[in-house]
Amino acid sequence: MDADALRAMQAPIKAKYKDDPNAAVITLRASGELDSQNIACKVETGRAMAVAGLHPATGGSGMELCSGDMLLEALVACAGVTLKAVATALEIPLKSGRVKAEGDLDFRGTLGVDREAPVGFREIRLTFEVDTDAPQEKLDSLLKLTERYCVVFQTINKPAPNAVKMVRV
């Protein structure tokens, strides 16, 4: 897809959202079923069932997906798609590229071993490796705009208000 095709595809969507801002607010959903036999949760992905379980650092077998890994994978997916869209819009040719995310966890927090240890990632690092002949100022713009428009990165970077509730069924 080139820049003109991307603009043509997005123009009516952008116009709709400009005319009706409420139309741009979409609620995304995810759900899963608790496994009745194991410490696991079966998450519906829209394509297949993903089974998440304990990370080996917390006693898991490593056979199920780790939700921390899934978070990083969501970041890589979103950042990669955003990078490609921005590069296309700016007409920055990318011969190839790779997106990497890594994050540091202190499992003492999630296991309750140390109340001072954080539960969650201490730090997340996102790296883009691109093969391109584009000048550095174009790459600087590409990085800035990718960071700005990546939904997952922005949600991690500036968390939205959260709510948790328990409902008896």
Image: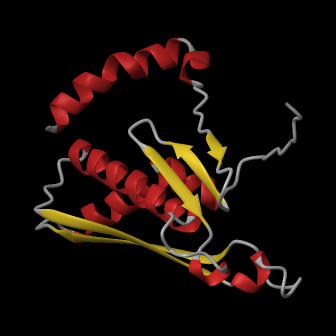
**Left or right: 67 in relation to 129:** right
In the picture, residue 39 is in which quadrant? bottom right
Where, quadrant-wise, is the N terminus in this rendering?
A: top left
On the rendered image, what quadrant is the C terminus found in?
top right
Q: Position of residue 167 (x, y in %)?
A: 87, 35
State left or right for residue 79 relative to residue 96. Answer: right
Q: Say whether residue 162 is left or right of residue 76.
A: right
The residue at 13%/55% (across/down) is: 93
- Image location of residue 14, percent across then percent down: 41, 22
- For the point 26% across and 68% down, the residue is 98
Q: Is residue 32 above or below residue 38?
A: above
* In the foreground, 168 or 114: 168
Q: 9 and 39: which one is in front?
A: 39
Number of on-image labels: 0
Residue at 44% across, 61% down: 73
| In the rendered image, the vertical position of residue 115 relative to residue 133, given as above or below | below
Left or right of 19, for residue 6 = left
Q: Nearer the viewer, residue 87 or 115?
A: 115
Residue 117 in percent (x, y) is at 80, 84
